[in-house]
Structures are given as C-alpha cells and as structure tokens.
Amino acid sequence: MGPRYGAIGVVFLEVDDSSRHRVTSPMRRNDRFLIRVCCFAALTLAPLVLATARAQNDAEAAFPASQLQFKSVFASRAATRAVYCLLGNGFFRAPSSGDIDALIAAFLAAHPAAQAVPVTVTAQNIGNAKSGVPMIYIWVEDGDVNLNVNLVREGAYPGNVMLDVVQAFGGRIASMKDEEKPRRLIANDKYQAFIARVAGAQDAAKAEKKGVWSDEFQERINGPERP
C-alpha cells in the first residue's frame, strides 16, 4: 500500500506502512521565513496595539486626578501609554512663571477628590510624532474649582495656552489626515464656558501683575521699556 496523506493546516503528514513518520511541507523556504516574520510582528505589536486602544478608550471618561503622576504640566498614568497635559497647546514654548510644580502640588493636596477630565486627544505625542502615543489635554477640577483656570489666575501661564488644539489649529485641521486630526471629547458649550473662565482669570492676573504679567517678567521677555 502506498503512503497516505492527511492535511494538517499547511503542513502534510506522510505515513507509510513501515510506521515511519516524517513531516513535509509544500512551502518554499522564503514562504516559511515570511510566516515567521509575520508571527513575530503580531506577537510584538499586539501589546502595543492593545495599550494604545486602551489609552484612547481612557480618553473618553473622567477619572481621579490622584491616579496621575505629574512632572510640570505633563502627567502619566499607570496601565496606559497616553501622555496627559494641563495645557491645550504651546506645550514647550509657552512662557511660564516657573513655580508650576508647587502650584499643581498645592491644588491636588487641597482637592484630593479632584477629577481629571479628558478634553481633547491628539493621535500622537507632540515632539515624538512617530510614537503613536496619544496626547490628552485634561482639566483637573473639583466641583467648580479648576486647576487649569487656577494656573492662569496665578499668572503661571497666559490664558491662550488653555485653548485646545482643535481651536488653536483652526483651518489647518482640514488638511490633516483623518488619523492625525485632534478630537474634542466634550460638548462645545462646556468648552466655551471654560474658555470664558480662563479669559476672566487672565484679566485678573494681569490687573494684579501676577507671574508672567509682573513687570519683572515682562521686562525679562520683552526687554526694558524705551523712554
């Protein structure tokens, strides 16, 4: 009796009457190499894809601000790859009074129940455009008290850094690829009410010459006034 063949996936098991077994494959060596590469890529990228998906899902819901680890206005959170930020734009170039860490720490200590509210998500981390790490603009608030507004009120930043990238980019968004476009996660009326509060906070900080509105700071960045 001749050999019998049974199909097992893409590999064929050949059995002869002498009970000798050997495995043969109709695939070429290059095909087997490509399959190994694809399997390796799938195993390597699967955790990254799942983590990114989770980060994007996390962008939708508020969560306790105590879960964040802050370093200046940037923060990280366990079990997600997202980068959180208290500024909506101008992350690295915005003028600041320099006492940001102390202001954030004092607010969080005074408001242990504060919530982090995701506002806008961008597809990629600014400054590392190929990372695929979401950058999520957040507000930290406890009832009617808002850390972002407080930073502007204390003169830590000018108010325009609290505009989200959807507003800051304006018409440029239309020319962006769909996967690169920033996405606002909250209702527009809530966002506009926040911006109105920021404007009021900036007016008060300017009137009191706090932080970036102090004469000393303005002279440092603009130079002394000419007589």
Image (tube, rainbow, N blue to C red):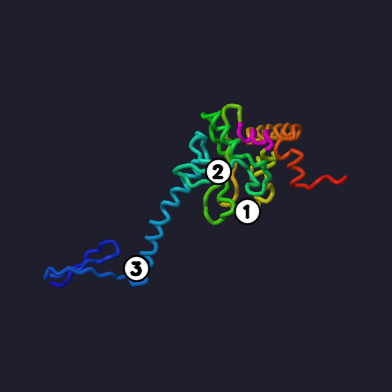
- 75 sits left or right of 201 in the view: left
Query: Does the residue at mark 1 contact the one at mark 2 (Cβ under 8 Å)?
Result: no
Left or right of 29, for residue 139 = right
Query: Which residue is denoted by mark 1 in the rendering?
Result: 176
Q: Is residue 4 left or right of residue 124?
A: left
Residue in view at x 77 percent, y 47 percent: 222
Instruction: Name above or below for residue 4 compared with residue 109.
Output: below
Q: Which mark lies nearer to you, 1 or 2?
A: 2
Question: Tag 2: Cα neighbours inside 10 Å, few (<14), some, or many (≥20)?
Answer: few
Quarter-of-image position of residue 139: top right
| Amino acid on which the number 1 mark rests in the picture | Met
Query: Can you tell which mark lies on residue 71?
Result: 2
**Residue highlighted by disc 3:** 32
The residue that appears at 25% across and 63% down in the rendered structure is 7
Q: Which circle marks residue 193 in the picture?
A: none
Q: Are marks 1 and 3 in contact (CB under 8 Å)?
A: no
Viewer-nearest residue: 117 or 157: 157
2 and 3 marks in contact (CB < 8 Å): no
Write down the region rendered in magenta: 146-155
Q: Residues within 10 Å of mark 3 (few under 14, many from 20)?
A: few
